[in-house]
Amino acid sequence: MHPMFIPHVPVRLALAVGAAEHRLHQYFPRLVRVLTRSSPARAAPFEELQRIESDPAFRALFRAELSACIVQSAEAALTELRQAIRPDSEERAA
């Protein structure tokens, strides 16, 4: 057996499998579709996005909660920034 032959076997096998797969897709598209795994069920975040897009009441509630969260986060960042600039400002206010 020639030593150069061994590395080429997996490559040729992969090419043959790829060609067979292509022929299956070409001649039996329904069979391939049935045999391949179906996509997983939609994740919960996507369902929530669909609900936000389709339900006006839920959209309003979501926007209100999002705005409150953004304001709260901005206030916390502002407080942290003020503490970084003047760490003793709370002592002066008291």
Image: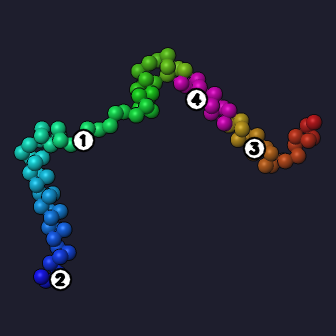
Which residues make up the magenta segment? 62-73
Badge 2 or badge 4: first in the primary sequence: 2
Q: Going by the picture, which residue comes out furthest to the bottom? A: 2
Look at label 2 and name its amino acid.
Pro
Q: CA distance from mark 1 to mark 4?
A: 37 Å
Element under disc 1: loop
Badge 1 or badge 4: first in the primary sequence: 1
Decide: is 45 above or below 61.
Answer: below
Q: Decide: marks 1, 3 in contact (CB < 8 A)?
A: no
Q: Nearer the viewer, mark 1 or mark 4?
A: 1
- Point out the image quarter for the C terminus: top right
Tell me if 66 is positioned left or right of 18 in this view.
right
Q: CA distance from mark 2 to mark 3?
A: 68 Å
x and y, in percent, of residue 82 in the image: 79, 44
Instruction: Give the numbered dot on residue 66.
Output: 4
Crowd around label 3: few <14 · some 14–19 · many ≥20 (10 Å)? few
Instruction: Give the numbered dot on residue 3.
Output: 2
Give yes or no for residue 72 being in the magenta stretch: yes
Element under disc 2: loop
Residue at point 8%, 43% (across, down): 28
Badge 1 or badge 3: first in the primary sequence: 1
Instruction: Give the numbered dot on residue 80.
Output: 3
Instruction: Give the numbered dot on residue 37.
Output: 1
Look at label 4 and name its amino acid.
Leu
Tell me if 21 is positioned left or right of 88 in this view.
left
Q: Decide: marks 3, 4 in contact (CB < 8 A)?
A: no
Badge 2 or badge 3: first in the primary sequence: 2
Tell me if 92 is positioned left or right of 31 in this view.
right
Instruction: Give the numbered dot on residue 92.
Output: none
Q: CA distance from mark 3 to mark 4?
A: 21 Å
Look at label 3 and name its amino acid.
Glu
